[in-house]
Image (spheres, rainbow, N blue to C red):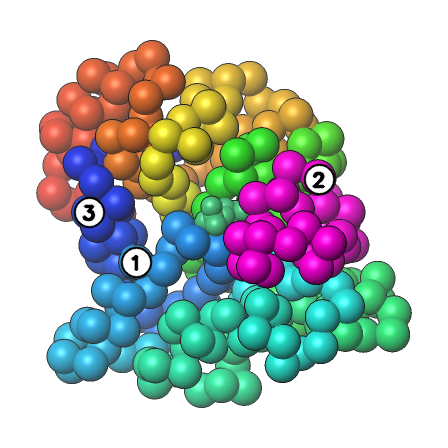
């Protein structure tokens, strides 16, 4: 696990954009997260595309997760969110931007079909991840199996509370069920890029990086992956014990090693 510590959330965004841009240039399959954290990264990628520095025209994208039960055109579906935040502003073909079908009559079957679609397309080359305050990745809440595949999950009340901000603060409007890539599915991606900013994530970041591998902190499963880039701002590293070592290791990284 490579830990990159930068001063602020803007630098998290530009550093993450550097990593994603390198994959996009190779026409790689991108795994996209929604939520607040990647918004700056997406803005930066759009900026580079508009300035002619970057193209996504050979890329395919898969979202991590989707609410169950919201109409597809609801502005808070992740289907709409990713188009608003990123994909309708760049040159990726819309039919190559995939997300789980949260409107399916049989969401469990839709989840299994999504898993098959990812496999048929050759898997995900780079997966962007954010972390929940309870350590979730995708919507794999604490106690999710570390081997889980794409399936339906019930959101933890803390996540419902955290996400109420996207529903005018009204928790009763937040769907309680989601389809999410499983932790096993996420670990199949060839490169994981975790971004976290702000003090509210410091506790979860510590459990992810320095805690034991445990289903109580789903993000700790990243310790089992061979290629993980974790990009954090100063506030998010407040509870880490080994900041000096991570900083030393990154500053001594040979340039040829790349991301
Ligand atoms: C979103 C997702 C979630 C978020 C996490 C952090 O697709 O899978 O795991 O990454 O809830 O959300 P923010 O970035 O809003 O703090």
Instruction: Reply above or below: 259 against 55.
Output: above
Between circles 3 and 2, the one closer to the viewer is 2
What residue is drawn where x is 57% and y is 44%?
162
Measured Cα–Cα span from mark 3 to mark 2: 31 Å
Which residue appears farthest toward the right when viewing the image? 106
Q: Secondary structure at mark 1?
A: helix
From this viewpoint, is residue 221 visible?
no
Q: Are marks 3 and 2 in contact (CB under 8 Å)?
A: no
Q: Position of residue 104 (x, y in %)?
A: 81, 74
Dot label at residue 11: 3
- Real-space CA distance between mark 2 and mark 1, rounded to the nearest whole angstrom: 26 Å
Relative to 18, does residue 225 appear above or below in the rendering? above
Queried on whether the Cβ of the residue with tag 3 lies below 8 angstroms from ligand 1, the answer reads no
Tell whether 118 sits left or right of 104. left
Query: Is 138 on the left-hand or right-hand side of 7?
Result: right
Front residue of 45/78: it is 78
SS for tag 2? Answer: loop
| Highlighted magenta segment, given as a residue range | 148-177
Where residue 210 sits in the image (x, y, percent)?
44, 18
Residue located beneath label 2 in the image: 156
Residue 137 falls in image quadrant: top right
């Amino acid at each position: 696990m490579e830990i990159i510590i930068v001063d602020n959330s803007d630098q998290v965004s530009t550093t993450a954009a550097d990593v994603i841009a390198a994959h996009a240039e190779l026409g790689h399959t991108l795994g996209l997260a929604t939520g607040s954290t990647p918004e700056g990264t997406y803005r930066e990628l759009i900026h580079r595309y508009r300035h002619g520095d970057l193209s996504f025209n050979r890329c395919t994208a898969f979202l991590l997760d989707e609410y169950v039960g919201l109409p597809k055109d609801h502005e808070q579906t992740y289907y709409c969110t990713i188009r608003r935040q990123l994909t309708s502003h760049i040159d990726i073909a819309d039919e190559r931007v995939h997300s789980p079908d949260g409107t399916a009559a049989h969401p469990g079957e839709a989840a299994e079909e999504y898993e098959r679609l990812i496999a048929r397309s050759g898997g995900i080359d780079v997966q962007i991840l954010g972390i929940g305050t309870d350590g979730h990745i995708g919507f794999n809440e604490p106690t999710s199996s570390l081997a889980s595949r794409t399936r339906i999950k019930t959101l933890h009340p803390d996540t419902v509370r955290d996400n109420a901000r996207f529903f005018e603060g009204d928790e009763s409007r937040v769907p309680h069920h989601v389809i999410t890539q499983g932790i096993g599915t996420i670990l199949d991606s060839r490169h994981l890029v975790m971004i976290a900013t702000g003090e509210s994530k410091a506790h979860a970041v510590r459990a992810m990086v320095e805690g034991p591998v445990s289903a109580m902190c789903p993000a700790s499963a990243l310790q089992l992956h061979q290629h993980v880039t974790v990009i954090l701002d100063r506030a998010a590293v407040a509870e880490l014990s080994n900041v000096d070592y991570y900083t030393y290791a990154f500053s001594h990284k040979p340039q040829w090693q790349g991301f």
